[in-house]
């Protein structure tokens, strides 16, 4: 069975600095997708970034980028120039190709220090 | 324009009551989901429908019953509410995974409090 592990329950970073949130997953599949979602205090779940496993290039969305290491089954999220609005729970999720179900990590709470 | 909407956003009710939460998406997606998020923020899939057909039916009490009148709507009805049902319930939608590798788009959540 596939599992997703976020080993950091909480992280904190100084405003304007860079922080990396870790995510590892376990699967025997070769074709799958990985996602990072953000849930701010407003509780809205927001898709931050996604990565297709067949792509070697790491996905990037403005200040958000991933380090996708397929062999190591690692999918970390890097947030550059952290802003107060980045404070949120961050969830890593995995989906096997052609499968409807997302497998979720337990989340990492990110605190931004002004 | 709201993409995925849920009503109500807050629901406070007594144990034993029956309540419904409604969800609508205007994204043209084929697939809709219900999740439960507990107090520790853990997200648990409950149900999923694709084009009105139930495709995910996780182990939840049969007091929970989803209904999809059309592919843009997925409602959740809960009978005989219990204290442990208190949580935030999220509706989400996506394109069919068979068609495109899209992520899921979430509604604002419904905070259910059972007294």
Image: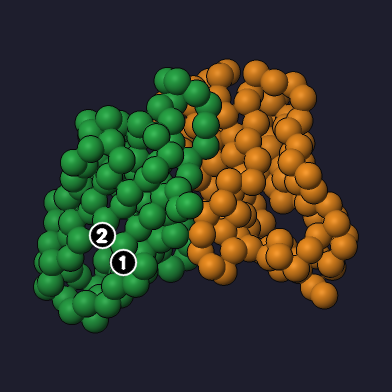
Chain colours: A orange, B green
Judge whether residue B21 can be spotted in this image: yes
Q: Secondary structure at mark 2?
A: strand
Q: Which mark is residue B8?
A: 1
**In the rendered structure, the residue with mark 2 lies on which chain?**
B
Q: Position of residue A33 (x, y in %)?
A: 57, 29
**In the rendered structure, the residue with mark 1 lies on which chain?**
B
Q: Position of residue B15 (x, y in %)?
A: 16, 76
Front-most of A80 and A8? A80
Q: 10 Å neighbourhood of mark 2: few (<14), some, or many (≥20)?
A: many
Q: Quadrant of residue B99?
A: top left
Q: Quadrant of residue B26?
A: top left
Q: Secondary structure at mark 1?
A: loop
Q: Residue at x 82, y 75 (%)?
A: A114
Q: Which mark is residue A1?
A: none
Q: 10 Å neighbourhood of mark 1: few (<14), some, or many (≥20)?
A: some
Verify CB contact (< 8 Å) between mark 2 and mark 1: yes
Would you place residue B11 above or below residue A79 in this image? Answer: below
Q: Residue at x 69, y 26 (%)?
A: A70
Q: Is residue B16 left or right of residue A99?
A: left
Numbered label tally:
2
Judge whether residue B61 can be spotted in this image: no
Front-most of B22 and A15? B22
Q: Position of residue B107 (x, y in %)?
A: 43, 54
Front-most of B89 and A1? B89
Q: Position of residue A100 (x, y in %)?
A: 40, 31
**Mark with earlier residue (2, 1):** 1
**According to the image, label 2 marks what residue?**
B21
Would you place residue B56 above or below residue A29 in this image? Answer: below
Q: Quadrant of residue B48?
A: top left
Q: Residue at x 19, y 70 (%)?
A: B82
Q: Residue at x 31, y 40 (%)?
A: B72
């Amino acid at each position: 069975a596939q599992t997703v592990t976020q080993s950091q329950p909480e992280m904190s970073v100084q405003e304007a600095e860079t922080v990396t949130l870790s995510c590892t997953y376990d699967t025997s599949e070769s074709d799958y997708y990985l996602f990072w979602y953000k849930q701010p205090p407003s509780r809205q779940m927001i898709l931050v970034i996604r990565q297709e496993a067949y792509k070697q290039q790491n996905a990037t969305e403005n200040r958000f980028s991933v380090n996708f290491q397929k062999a190591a089954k690692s999918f970390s999220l890097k947030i550059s120039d952290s802003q107060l609005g980045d404070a949120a729970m961050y969830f890593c999720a995995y989906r096997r190709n052609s499968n409807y179900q997302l497998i979720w990590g337990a989340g990492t709470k990110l605190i931004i220090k002004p | 324009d709201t993409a995925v909407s849920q009503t109500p956003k807050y629901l406070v009710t007594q144990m034993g009551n029956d309540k419904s939460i409604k969800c609508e998406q205007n994204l043209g997606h084929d697939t809709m989901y219900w999740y439960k998020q507990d107090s520790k923020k853990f997200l648990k899939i409950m149900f999923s429908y694709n084009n009105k057909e139930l495709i995910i039916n996780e182990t939840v009490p049969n007091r929970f019953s989803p209904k999809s009148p059309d592919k843009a709507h997925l409602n959740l009805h809960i009978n005989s509410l219990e204290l442990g049902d208190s949580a935030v319930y999220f509706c989400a939608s996506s394109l069919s995974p068979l068609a495109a590798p899209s992520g899921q788009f979430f509604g604002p959540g419904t905070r259910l409090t059972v007294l």
